[in-house]
Amino acid sequence: MAKVVALANQKGGVGKTTTAINLAASVALLGKKVLLIDADPQANATSGLGFDINLKGIYECIVGEATAEEVIQHSEDIKKLWLLPSSINLVAADTELPTMENAHRIIKGIVDSVRDKFDYIFIDCSPSLGFTTVNILTAADSVLVPVQCEYLALEGLSKLLNTIKMVKGRLHPELEIEGFVLTMYMRNRLNNQVVSEVREHFGELAYETIIQRNIRLGEAPSHGKPVMLYDAAATGSVNYLNLAREFIKRNRNK
Ligand SMILES: Nc1ncnc2c1ncn2[C@@H]1O[C@H](COP(=O)(O)OP(=O)(O)O)[C@@H](O)[C@H]1O
Ligand SMILES: [Mg+2]
C-alpha cells in the first residue's frame, strides 16, 4: 500500500511543483513505484513531465466522468513513474466539491482506488488552502512542505500549520508532517539565516538536504523532463536525488 504524501504551501512559487516532479522522479529512479498526482489547475506538473494539459485527469475523477485507473499516464522516460494529470478544469473543484455527497473524502476515494498499485503517491497541491487542498490533506498520510529560502519564509507557514491542525482535529487524526524542505538556496547571509531559523524551529522535521537555486531546474520543465533526465550532472539533479535518498531513508520503517 502506497504512502500518500501531499506537497503543500499556500504560497506560490516556493518550489512545490519542482519538488513534486523531481522528488517523484528520483524516488522512482531509486526503484520505488511512484504515482504523481497533479492537483493544481495550472497543471505545471503535467506539462513539466511532458504531458498534454488537456488530458482527462483529476477533475474528471472528482466529478465521476472517469476513474483514476483510466486517466493515469505512464512516464515514457522513467519505468516506475506514473502521472495522474490535471487541467484548467480543476478550477471548478473548489466550488463543486462542497456540494457533493461525502464532500471531504472525494479525493481520498480516488487516491485509495489506486493505492495498492504504488509504493509512494505524491500530490502536488495548488497555492491555496481551499476546499480542494483540505480534501487532499484528508487523503494524505503526510504533508511535505517546500520552504523557499527567503526573508519571512516562516511567516506564511503558520496558516498552513493551522490548516493541518484543523484537518487533524476534524477530519483525519493520523495526518502527519513529513518534513520541511528548503528550496532555492543561495550561499549568502540571508539564506543561511533562513536555514538556521527553519532548523531551529522545526528540528528533525527539517530535511538535511537543501535544494540550491539552479538554472537547470527552471529549464527542465520546458523540455517535459525531470531535471536528472535533462542534465544529470546539474546541481539540481544531485540535490533532488539526495532528497529522495533522505526521504526513503526516513520512511525505511514504514
Ligand atoms: N531550486 C530552484 N532553482 C531555480 N529555479 C527554481 C528552483 N525551484 C523552483 N524554481 C523555479 O521557480 C518557479 C516556481 O517554482 P514552482 O516549483 O513552480 O513553485 P510552486 O509550485 O510552489 O508554485 C518556477 O519557475 C521554477 O522553475
Ligand atoms: Mg506549483
Image (tube, grey):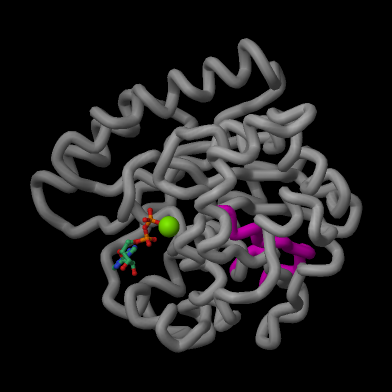
The C terminus sits in image quarter: top right
Look at 76% across and 63% down and name the residue there. 32
Q: Position of residue 235 (x, y in %)?
A: 36, 74
Q: Quadrant of ligand 1?
A: bottom left
Residue 10: x %, y % from top left: 38, 39
Tell me where residue 48 appears, x and y as whole percent.
49, 75
Labels in figure, total? 0
Residue 244 is situated, as x and y percent measured from the top left of the image, at 58, 59
Residue 181 sits above or below residue 138 on the image: below
Is 31 in the magenta? yes
Find residue 107 and report its image quarter.
top right
The range drawn in magenta is 26-39
Q: Residue at x 51, y 65 (%)?
A: 43
Residue 241 in view (yes/no):
no
Asked whether residue 2 appears in the rendered view, the answer is yes
Residue 185 as seen in the image, left or right of residue 25: left
- 2 with respect to 133 (left or right): right
Q: Using the image, determine if residue 118 lies above or below residue 197.
A: below
Please give the name of the residue rendered at 56% of the width and 60% of the height, measured from the top-left corner.
Answer: 89
* Residue lying at 82% horizontally and 61% vertically, measured from the top left: 66
Which one is in front, 177 or 93?
A: 93
Quadrant in which residue 33 is drawn: bottom right
